[in-house]
Image (cartoon, rainbow, N blue to C red):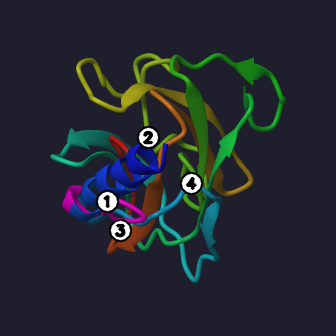
Amino acid sequence: MLRRTGLLVSLLAMVFVLAPATTASAAPYCGITWGSLAKSANPTRTGDLVNIRAGRHTCYDRLVFDATGPANGYWVSYVDQMREDPTGRVIPLRGGARLSITVQAPSYDRNGVPTYRYANRSELVDVTGYRTFRQVAFAGSFEGTTTVGLGVRARLPFRVFTLPNRIVVDVAHLW
């Protein structure tokens, strides 16, 4: 019995010595450390929304809001249901998760003339074949803000930043 116990202890010691070391946590996907909590910025000045476009990148999908002037105020968060502004009507979105994106850029000028026109409010941008994006839908433009619903594959990390005359939303392909 003692001989078997000694053999077992020796065998276990060899397993621990020869086993490769593992790290406590893997490196983040593509170096992304954005997280999935709400992100916002208060506007200093705003322009009018004139276009919404999307692009595919190696590590993330991108949605861009183009404006006539500075566009730097936003509120972006995951929501259980996407709702139209100001009616509150539920807007169905494809995907496992929904991002509500509100930008401080109206889709109309000071005379109420539309500055951003779309052919189909449920499909603002064709995101067919995108790795993360599933649908981009108009959710309203009211009191100086425009809201868009973004259906994504799953609740994934995202970031938001501004450039001159645009607001950019990137959603990672993986965690």
Give whichever of 163, 57 is nearer the camera: 57
Q: Residue at the location (33% across, 72% down)?
A: 163
Q: Secondary structure at mark 4?
A: loop
Q: Earlier in the sequence, mark 1 or mark 4?
A: 1
Residue identified by numbered label 3: 165
State the separation of the CA atoms marked 2 and 4: 28 Å
Q: Amino acid at mark 4?
A: Ser
Residue identified by numbered label 2: 116
State the separation of the CA atoms marked 4 and 3: 25 Å
Magenta range is: 18-27
Give whichever of 152, 65 is nearer the camera: 152
Which of the two marks, 2 or 1, is nearer to us in this view? 1
Which of the two marks, 1 or 3, is nearer to us in this view? 1
Residue identified by numbered label 4: 36
Q: Amino acid at mark 3?
A: Asn
Q: Main secondary structure of the magenta part?
A: loop
Side of 16 where 110 appears, left or right: right
Q: Position of residue 90 (x, y in %)?
A: 76, 21
Q: Amino acid at mark 2?
A: Tyr
Rendered image quadrant of residue 165: bottom left
State the separation of the CA atoms marked 2 and 1: 63 Å
